[in-house]
Image (tube, rainbow, N blue to C red):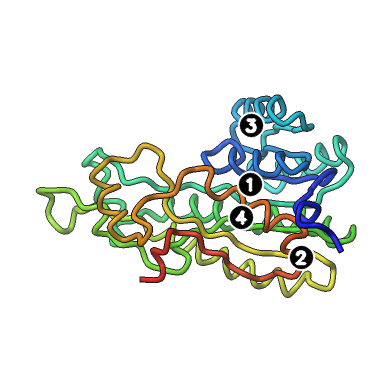
Amino acid sequence: MKSSKDLFDLTGRVAIVTGGAGLLGVQHTEALAEVGAFLVVADIREDAAKNVADQVSCTYHQPILGLKMDVTDPNSIQSAYRQILDRFGRIDILINNAAIDPKVQNDDSLLETSRFEHFPLEQWDLEISVGLSGAYLCAQVFGSHMAEHGGGVILNIASDLSVIAPDQRLYRKERLPEDQQPVKPVTYSVIKTGLIGLTRYLAAYWAPKGVRVNALSPGGVYSGQSMEFVSRLVNLIPLGRMAEPDEYRGAIQFLCSDASKYMTGQNIVIDGGRSVL
């Protein structure tokens, strides 16, 4: 029987984090480096990916590869796949983290286009291609490798908005008519809910091959939002605050390691209790 410490140990395993230079992508990278994994920081911004790789490598003294990868482009994913195998020779973990998180803008000229009635098809296509199709394409390449080589772990990063609808009152602005009030766009909820469906499908599909697939649904993370927005949001959260960026690291370690080896197809919601109300 393994000790609890050994269950979390990822020494020698190779993990890919898409969108790895983003706010939570960096946290996911550090979380897995801390328990011994070799990391691939994949991001469409090559310089940012390499900077994160260098910083985390210096801190945790682990081999880390930073590379450019466009999750919407199958050729880019295949190129990254070859580079990863050349460097590490194996792939054990994929964290599908890449996304476009639409923020409510302060520019009043942009407010109306966030609303469903006027949401541009081009923006729908772009956000779906990154957040949902990108996860599908990465799972197809990297997950297939795992299925052919003894198993592995896929973790899809969803959101509390995979299980609840956005409360549009959070985004209201004074003195604007109702038909111009900004909202959280439809794409975000559709993508995050779709990731849960992808999680369940792949969990059942690849279970015989030893590939476990789960989802993590974080709540709102504090990253300098306006005090007005924060005050509104924390009133919806039983714990009375937003998450700090590093508060999902333990969950990442659990879901990517043997500590969760009997778990697959699940969506773990960590949102301070917001979704239970």
Alpha-carbon neighbours of circle 3 within 10 Å: few (<14), some, or many (≥20)? Answer: many
Residue hosting label 3: 49
Gap in angstroms between the C-alphas marked 1 and 2: 27 Å
| Marked residue nearer the N-terminal end (1 or 2) | 1
Quarter of the rendering occupied by the C terminus: bottom left
Q: Give the residue type at disc 2.
A: Lys
Classify mark 3: helix, strand or loop: helix
Classify mark 1: helix, strand or loop: loop
| Marked residue nearer the N-terminal end (4 or 3) | 3
| Marked residue nearer the N-terminal end (1 or 3) | 3
Alpha-carbon neighbours of circle 2 within 10 Å: few (<14), some, or many (≥20)? Answer: some
Residue hosting label 2: 261
Q: Is residue 206 left or right of residue 268?
A: right
Q: Is residue 241 left or right of residue 32?
A: left
Measuring from the top left, give residue 36's x and y in whole percent: 78, 41
Residue hosting label 4: 251
- Are the residues flagged by discs 4 and 2 in contact, CB closer than 8 Å? no
Gap in angstroms between the C-alphas marked 2 and 3: 29 Å
Measuring from the top left, give residue 107's x and y in whole percent: 25, 38
Q: Is residue 141 visible?
A: no
Q: Which disc number belongs to residue 71?
A: 1
Classify mark 4: helix, strand or loop: helix
| Marked residue nearer the N-terminal end (4 or 2) | 4
Q: Give the residue type at disc 4.
A: Ala
Gap in angstroms between the C-alphas marked 4 and 3: 23 Å
